Amino acid sequence: MNKSLNIIVLFFTLFAFATLSNAQSHHNHAKCGVSIDEGISIKNRMLENRRNKAELLARFESSRSNDSTVFVPLQFHVVNKSDGTGGEKISDIIANLCRLNDDYLHLNIEFYLAGPVRTINQDYLYNNDFSTGLANYFMGLYKIDGVVNIFIGNQIVSGQSGGTTLGYYTSGLDIIYAIRGAVNGSATTLTHELGHFFSLPHTFFGWENSNYADVMTGTNGRTPSFTLSGWPVENIARGGGNDNCTVAADGFCDTEPNYLFGFFGGAYNNGCDYAATAHDPQGYMFRPEMIAPNATAFKFTEDNSSLTEMFLKNNSTKDKLYPKTKIVIETQYTLGANTTTMWQDTIGDSDTTDLFVAANSTNDIISASLQSSLDVKYGFINMGDYYLDVDVSAPSAPSLNFNAAQANYTITGAAHDIAMDSLQVLNTSTTLTVAANTAVIISDIFTDGTSQISTADRSFTLPVALAPGETHTFTASDLQAGSTGLSSIAGVSFNVNTFAPLSDTTGTTSENVMSYYSDACATLFSPEQGDAIKLDIIARAYETLYPEPSNIDITDVATVNTPSDSAIAPNPLVNFTWNAVNGATMYYVHIYEINFLGLPISGGDDHEFITTDIDVWRTLEANSVYAWEVKPINSTFFCDNSFTSEKTIFWVYDWTVNTEKVLSDIESSKVFPNPSSADENVMLEINASVNGKAEISILNAIGQSVMPDFVLGLSKGTNLQQINTSTLNAGLYVINIKTNSGIISHKLVIKD
C-alpha cells in the first residue's frame, strides 16, 4: 500500500462514514460461522470495553499521541489438501488485503503483512468440520503469536442450517478462518470477521439460526420480546422510553434493528433492501412503505359513522401483513380546498384489532358481516362524529310520502358510489293525482352531528302518474343512475389514509458489514461500531504493541534474470532469479502455464508464492510453455502493480537424461565421445530415413544458447558432423536436433 495515500491526520475521528467500494461477488445465501455462544463472548467483550471506556481512553492518551494510524499485522495461512493442491491464490489474498485497508481506512487502521504467506497441507484443516474440532486443533498448532492469524481453507462444515458458511472468528484461539471462495478483492468476509475480532457482534445478534416467519408461527401476532436464545429483541423506536438498543442485539443504537433479514427468509434478500413486512415487538414495521398510503376501498352507511368495510393494501410481494402490525387509520373529508381529519387511531395495538393481508393483495380488515380473530372489530374504524343523512322530497307534489331503504356509500379510489335497495313513493292525497315526470329529490346531507356541513341533491322523475293512494317503487337499478362514479357525496369527497407509525424507518442495516447482506450491500461500519473497535484495540494494547512498519515506498520495477524471455529450460526443476528491488522485503512470484495465445490455461500448472529470496527453484511440467512475473512488495506496500516485472515466457523440457526420441525422418542419433573434454571435438551421428535437413543448437543447463545455431543437410543413411567444443567450459549441455518431425535432444557432459 502506498503510504503517501494513507497518512491520516486524526486517529479515529468518527465522522459519518463514506460508502466503500460496491464491486462485489454476490453471495445471498452466505453466512458467518460465529455461533450464538461465540457471539455472547464477543458482545461481552464489547460491553466490558464500553464500561471501561474512560480508563481505556486515558491509557491511550498517555501511551501515544492521538494523531497516528494503528498498525495491525496479519499472518495469512493458505491451507491446501494434504497432497499440496487446492489452496487459495496468493493474488486473491493480496487483493483482499488491499480491500481491507480500504474498508478500515476511515478508522485509521492499517493492516500489513507480518511475513510471507505460509502454506499448510492438511486435509482436516482444508475441509473444516466444526463437529470434530480437528481444524481448531491444527490452527492452534500453526498459529503465530503476536499477530492476527487468518487461515484460508476450502470449506466450513457447520451445524448451522442453510447457506454457505464463508468464515468465522473464534475467541478461544483468537483466529479467523475463511473459505477460499470468500477471499478476493471484492469480498467483505474478512472485513466482517475482523469486525468480530475487534469485538463487534452481528447486527442481528440473538437471531442466529432463527427465521422470523418461523418465530411468528408460535406467537399471537406480535414479535416476541425475547429471541429463542433468550436475548432481548431490539425495538425500532429510538428514544421516548421505548428503545432498548443499548442492550438488545448488537448493543449499538446507530445500527438499525435486524432480525437476520440479510440471509434467512430466502426471497427477502434479493437486493440490498429488506422487502417484507416484519414488525418489532411493539408492532412497528421495518418497511412501513409496504402499507399502501390509502385504503383501496371502504364503505359506510346512512346515519352511521362506523366503516362497515375497509380494504387494506399490502404492497410487499414477499410476505403477508402479520397480525399486530401497527397501522394508523385516518378518515378524512375534503370540501373545496380544505381537508379535515374526522378520526385517527392505530390498529394492531390490542387484542381486538388484529389484521391479516396476504402478500401483494388487499383484504377487508373489518368485514362487519363475518368477524374472525384476524379482523378489526366492527365499529372501531369510524368517522368520529361525522355521518351522512338522507332526505327525500318532491317540492311540486307535497302529497307524496317516501319510504327509503338505507343508503350505502362505497368509495373506491376517487370514485364515490351511492346505493339504495329501493325507494317507495306514496300519494297520500284523497283527491289529487300526481302527474308523471314529477321530480323526486334525494338530498345527501353531511353533518358533524350538530350542524349541517354540506349537501347535494340527486333528482329522479316518476315514470307514471300516481292516483290518490297509489304507490310506485324505485328499484336499486332505477336509483343507480347518477349515483355511481361520482367525485363526491353531499358535496364532499372522502378518503382513508393508511400508514405505519415511524414512517421514516428503513429497517434493514443492509449497508452494515456485520449484517448478512451480500458484499454489494455491506459496505461500512457505524460510528458506534468504530468507537467499539477503537476501544478493543486499546484493550488489546495494539496502540503500542505494533509500531509503524518501515515507511519505504517501492519505486523500481522488478526485472527477471532467469529464465529469460524465450528461454528453454532443459530440466523441469527450474531456477528462477531476479534482481533485488530497493525497498522490497518480499516478492510475489507467479509462474503459470500458458497456451499458444499466451493466455493462462484453465486448470494448468500454476505456482504462486511470496518469498524473501531472489533465487528460488520450482518443479514444473515438462514439454510445456510457461509465463512468469515478479512483483516487489513489503509489509505495507503491496497494492501497486505498476512495479511488477514484464511477463516473461519460456519453454520447459526434460533433458536431464539422454533422450533417444525416434522421429519419422530420423532412425537414430548419438553424440560421442560423451563425456568429452574441452580439448577434443565431439561427433554428432544422425541416421536419417529420408533426405532433408536438421537445425542444430547447443544450450547450457538453464536453456541459454552457447554456440551459434547451424543447419545440417541430411542424406538418407548415416550423417556425421564434427562439433568444436573448445569454447565450452566444463558442465552440462544439451544438443538439440530439430527436424520437421520434432526435436531430439542429447545430454553432453564436458569434463575439465
Image: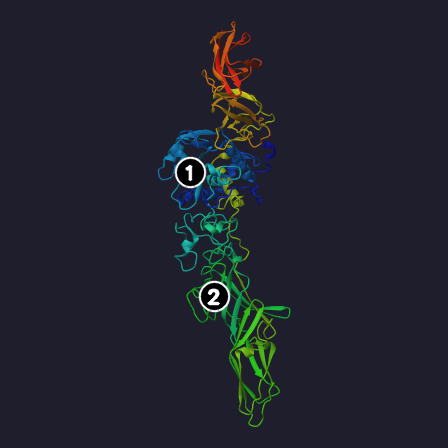
The Cα atoms of the two marked residues, 2 and 1, are separated by 49 Å
Q: Which mark is residue 365?
A: 2
Q: Position of residue 79 (x, y in %)?
A: 43, 32
Query: Outermost residue toward the right?
Result: 337
Q: Which residue is mark 1?
A: 155
Task: Specify the amino acid type for callout 2.
Answer: Ile
Say which quadrant the N terminus sits in. top right
**In this orientation, which residue lies closer to the viewer: 143 or 59?**
143
**In this orientation, which residue lies closer to the viewer: 239 or 452?**
452
Query: Outermost residue toward the bottom?
Result: 431
Task: Specify the amino acid type for callout 1.
Answer: Gln
Query: Outermost residue toward the top?
Result: 679
Q: Is residue 384 visible?
A: yes
Instruction: Find residue 340 and report its image quarter.
Output: bottom right
Classify mark 2: residues with Cα within 10 Å, few (<14), some (14-19) or many (20+).
Answer: many
Instruction: Find residue 415 and report its image quarter.
Output: bottom right
Classify mark 1: residues with Cα within 10 Å, few (<14), some (14-19) or many (20+).
Answer: many
Q: Position of residue 684 (x, y in %)?
A: 50, 11
Coloration of the structure image? rainbow
